[in-house]
């Protein structure tokens, strides 16, 4: 949180507080693939699974907030990460 009260943390909770959110700044580059992934532990066991993906013309510049598909009540240990790769 900065002096004006703005929260700069990329991780948060949905408006109802039931799910994690991840916020990132996307650039308008159609050659990039943005994938937010979720897992129940940092080792990826079970594997990291896609929560949301953006590529091509969907890559509009600006802030993006992705809400996890899993409620915190079902997965009390939940992690989100952002993967950015070049489109094949």
Image: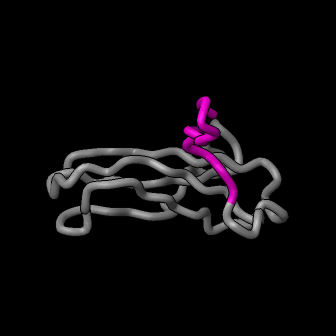
Q: 15 or 87, which is in the foreground?
A: 15
What's the residue at 67%, 63% (across, down)? 14
Quadrant where the N terminus is found in the figure: top right
Instruction: From the top left corner, tell me how far across and down residue 53 is, in percent.
Output: 38, 63
Question: Would residue 16 be counted in the magenta stretch?
Answer: no
Instruction: From the top left corner, tell me how far across and down residue 36 is, in percent.
Output: 47, 54
Question: Would residue 6 be counted in the magenta stretch?
Answer: yes
SS assignment for the magenta stretch, majority = loop
What's the residue at 51%, 61% (across, down)? 66
Q: 8 or 86, which is in the foreground?
A: 8
Drawn side of residue 75 relative to residue 45, left or right? right
What's the residue at 75%, 69% (across, down)? 16
Q: Which residues are magenta?
A: 1-13
Quadrant where the C terminus is found in the figure: bottom left
Q: Quadrant of residue 2?
A: top right
Drawn side of residue 86 relative to residue 8, left or right? left
Instruction: From the top left corner, tell me how far across and down residue 39 is, in percent.
Output: 63, 51
Instruction: From the top left corner, tell me how far across and down residue 86 is, in percent.
Output: 20, 47
Q: 6 or 37, which is in the foreground?
A: 6
Q: Can residue 66 be seen? A: yes
Q: Quadrant of residue 69?
A: bottom right
What's the residue at 25%, 61% (across, down)? 59
């Amino acid at each position: 949180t900065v002096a004006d009260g703005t929260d700069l943390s990329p991780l948060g909770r949905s408006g109802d507080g039931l799910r994690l959110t991840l916020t990132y700044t996307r650039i308008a580059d159609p050659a990039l693939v943005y994938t937010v992934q979720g897992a129940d532990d940092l080792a990826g066991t079970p594997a990291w699974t896609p929560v949301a993906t953006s590529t091509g013309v969907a890559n509009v510049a600006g802030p993006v907030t992705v809400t996890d598909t899993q409620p915190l009540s079902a997965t009390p240990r939940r992690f989100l990460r952002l993967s950015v790769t070049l489109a094949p």
